[in-house]
Structures are given as C-alpha cells and as structure tokens.
Image: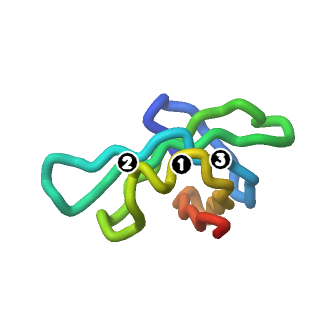
C-alpha cells in the first residue's frame, strides 16, 4: 500500500489513532489520517480514503483504531 505520504507498509494489523478526518469536496468520501502507535512503524502517518458514512470527522479524531493491510489494501476499524 502506498500512503498519501508515499510510504510503504507491509501487510498486517497495526494499532493506530485517528489524527484527522477530512470530508472530500465530492460529498461522498473522506480521507482519514491515522498514526501507528506501536512497533517498528510507530509514528508513521497513513492516509486512507473511506466513504462519507464512516463517521463524523470531529468524533473520529483521537479515536483508537485498528489498521489492517491485506495484499496492500488498507482498511480501518475504529475501536468504539
């Protein structure tokens, strides 16, 4: 997977915290920026595109989440 910052991250599961969530001007998607909080990639910031229904951008900020990368494709699950 290539992040918005052009950094590569290996397949696996990562503990992350949501830094920011920005709605796109298309009204259908948002970019969620997360940072990895443990392990060799600690501090790496990853940008992930998600549907607008993923959550309220303000409510998502600071939330713990899990980033999973499978075959280079990232998904995020916010830990509520």
| Nearer the observer, 20 or 2 | 20
Q: Position of residue 13 (x, y in %)?
A: 74, 60
Marks 3 and 2 sit apart, C-alpha to C-alpha, by 14 Å
| Nearer the observer, 73 or 47 | 47
* Secondary structure type for disc 2: strand
Residue 42 falls in which quadrant of the image?
Answer: top right
Image height of 27 relative to 8, above or below? below
Q: Residue furthest right?
A: 39
Mark in front: 3 vs 2:
3
Name the residue tied to disc 1: 1
Residue at position x 44%, y 36% in the image: 4
Dot 2 crowding, Cα within 10 Å, few <14, some 14–19, many 20+: some
Residue 40 falls in which quadrant of the image?
Answer: top right
Left of 3 or right of it: where is 29? left
Name the residue tied to disc 2: 31
Q: Position of residue 51 (x, y in %)?
A: 32, 65
Name the residue tied to disc 3: 17
Mark in front: 2 vs 1:
2
């Amino acid at each position: 997977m290539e992040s918005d910052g052009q950094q590569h991250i290996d397949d696996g599961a990562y503990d992350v915290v949501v830094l920011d969530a920005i709605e796109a001007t298309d009204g259908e998607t948002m970019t969620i920026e997360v940072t990895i909080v443990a392990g060799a990639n600690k501090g790496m910031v990853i940008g992930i595109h998600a549907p607008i229904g993923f959550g309220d951008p303000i409510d998502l900020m600071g939330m713990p989440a899990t980033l999973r990368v499978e075959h280079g494709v990232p998904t995020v699950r916010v830990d509520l």
